[in-house]
Image (tube, rainbow, N blue to C red):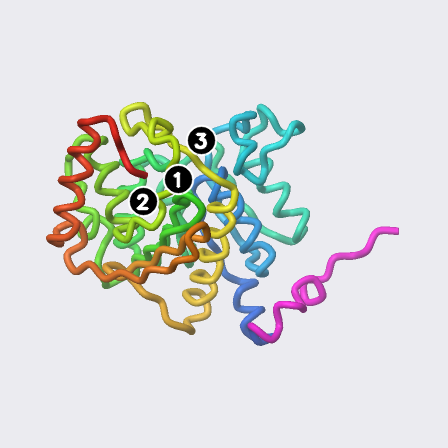
Amino acid sequence: MTTPFGYDKAFARNIGWVSPEEQQILRGKRVAIAGGGGVGGVHLLTLARLGVSNFHIADFDRFDIANFNRQVGANMDTIGEPKVEVMADMARRINPEIDIKVFPEGIESGNLDSFLEGVDLYIDGLDFFAFEIRRQTFARCAALGIPATTVAPLGMGAALLNFIPGQMTFEEYFQWGELPDVDKAVRFVVGLAPAGLHRPYLVVPSAVSFNERRGPSTIMACQICAGIAGTEALKILLKRGQVRAAPYGMQFDAYRNKLALTWRPGGNRNPLHRLMIAVGKRQLAGKVVPQ
């Protein structure tokens, strides 16, 4: 016998931390998530279990065995399958009434407006090295007045930045401009996690290469990211609770049991960040890159 789906019953255990009225507000919200891999995939499932019922998801990639260590949609049955289709199916298994618009070609300048049309929040799940489309997406969110959140998996923890309409923008914070991608990578790491809580326990430094666009990852970091992103989404969508926007940031590291709340006026123009960027570039030139 098949149990019929009922929204109110499925998400009844959320009530208490949200009111019945707020649960219905979440039901009507639409969230755009770029990237269906390590963080993007678990962001989608977390928000689906929160009761958010409308999504735009984008990813051009397919699952591979190299994704097994961290991506919730990756298993032997999904090797070679499009990430957006697999993740959309997993979300529909949670809520068969869910409305998901998929962008199997990923996001690019030509479909960015369609991807962001009618959304209440954008959550960044793009690959670390997707610099140009990430810049374009955050800039378009700012122009359209859409709140945007990025939670980066670093080591065995996560780093949070929110970009809220009318406040500091992504470009104002990171100061990428027309710099080479390697410089953007250094600035991205420094800007995301100026506290650097993850750096002391990197045991194989050669696993990180900005030039080769690769780095280590853990499922723990992705799951912590999803918990933080889901909580920020709840606060933003329901308009309650404190939302700290850039130049404020936060990093939590489960391995070291540490939490750092940061405030960097000027973002990467801040003297502390400028020093950290210079050190990072010197280390990169010496082929010893912290991540």
Q: Position of residue 171 (x, y in %)?
A: 20, 48
Q: Position of residue 280 (x, y in %)?
A: 20, 38
| Structural distance between the alpha carbons of marks 3 and 1 | 13 Å
Residue drawn at x 27%, y 54% is: 142
Q: Which residues are magenta?
A: 1-17
**Residue furthest right in the image:** 1
Residue at disc 2, secondary structure: helix
Q: Which residue is mark 2?
A: 137
Which amino acid is tagged 2? Answer: Thr
Q: Nearer the viewer, residue 282 or 133?
A: 282
Which amino acid is tagged 1? Answer: Leu
Specify whether residue 117 is in view. no
From this view, report whether residue 265 is shown above or below residue 134. below
The dot on residue 126 is 1
| Structural distance between the alpha carbons of marks 3 and 2 | 15 Å
Asked if marks 2 and 1 touch (Cβ < 8 Å), the reply is yes
Residue drawn at x 12%, y 51% is: 269
Q: Which residue is mark 3?
A: 105
Q: Earlier in the sequence, mark 3 or mark 1?
A: 3
Which amino acid is tagged 3? Answer: Glu
Asked if the stretch drawn in magenta spans residue 148, the answer is no
